[in-house]
Amino acid sequence: MKAIDFIYKVIPNDWFRKLSRKYYKFVKKWMKKMNEEEFLHFLRTKLNIENGDIVFVHSAMSKMNVTFPPQKMLELLKESVGEEGTLLFPCWHYTGRAEDYLRKTDSVFDVLNSKTTLGFLNQLAKNEPGAKRSWHPTVSVCAIGKRAEELTSQHHTDIYPCGEKSPWFLMLQYPSKIIGLGEKVVSLSFVHCIEDVMKGQFPIATLSAEVLSGKVITPEGNSLQVPTHYPQKGIKQRDVVSFFSKNIPRFIGQQFRYHGVNYFRCDALKLYQKMEQLAKDGKTIYHF
């Protein structure tokens, strides 16, 4: 286990956040910054992005150490997958627990106008001409590129947030990657796809038995009530970093640092197959 991961486990969260902020100030002051050409090369050689790929992007722009703004980063990501590729970004619009949001009588998800709470790069992607945003009330995903409509249009019809009609599962039929920019695998939302597709065969019940509905305003201005399960409270008792280091081969998924900044990359289909196999053997990211 790396020292930073050990520190994360043993000190209070607020202390860790303070240390993290100081660390990234140090990185931005003293570490080498990537320019546009270097970042595009990094996407291709370190994160294995190829023309035509479908790429699910997790990012923390505040932790990145580059010479260019988020809009240019989005342009470089689009260039890396080309016209035949597709980019996806988590795009939910609230903070806190999903069931608390769903139980509020005034909660409304406006697909076109609700801002995402998951970062500036994701908001830029949502605002891109031609971008598509799934209508799921708690875990919407936005997509830009060739298969954007195909990967997002069915999401709200699945009561399992990351189930078989979600972008996480649908992208598996194509060459798909998952990357983290300034992020560790703790942010990897894809891990829940295995749970939601396996359902009762997964070793742990991670979703509520209850189904709640969220109000959604569609891009056409229509109002829908979209039903969904929501995560159980114990779902936070997990350790994705340790699970990866112990169980996931590096050719499937790898977390690493480059010039002091965290990154990760995963082959989506191979990761799904490996995690499904591990789940059948009783090995999961959870410890509750």
Image (cartoon, grey):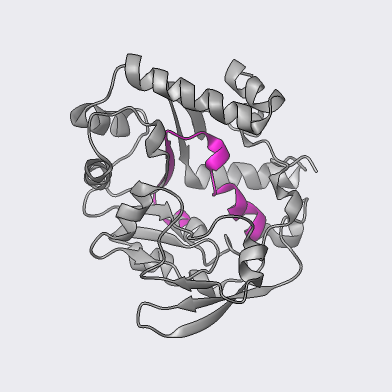
**Viewer can see residue 258:** no
Which region shows up in magenta? Answer: 172-196
Q: Residue at x 42, y 44 (%)?
A: 177
Is 103 displayed left or right of 37 in the figure? right
Q: Residue at x 54, y 49 (%)?
A: 190
Quadrant of residue 66 within the rendered picture: top left
Percent position of residue 62, x then y: 39, 35
Q: Is residue 282 magenta?
A: no
The front one of 263 and 113 is 113
Is 41 displayed left or right of 279 in the figure? left
Q: Residue at x 62, y 27 (%)?
A: 15
Look at the picture and state if 242 lies above or below 180: above
Percent position of residue 237, x then y: 73, 42
The front one of 14 and 238 is 14
Quadrant containing the C terminus is top right
Quadrant containing the N terminus is top right
**Viewer can see residue 192:** yes
The front one of 114 and 270 is 114
Disc tally is 0
Percent position of residue 17, x then y: 56, 30
Single out the residue that lies furthest toward the bottom. Answer: 222
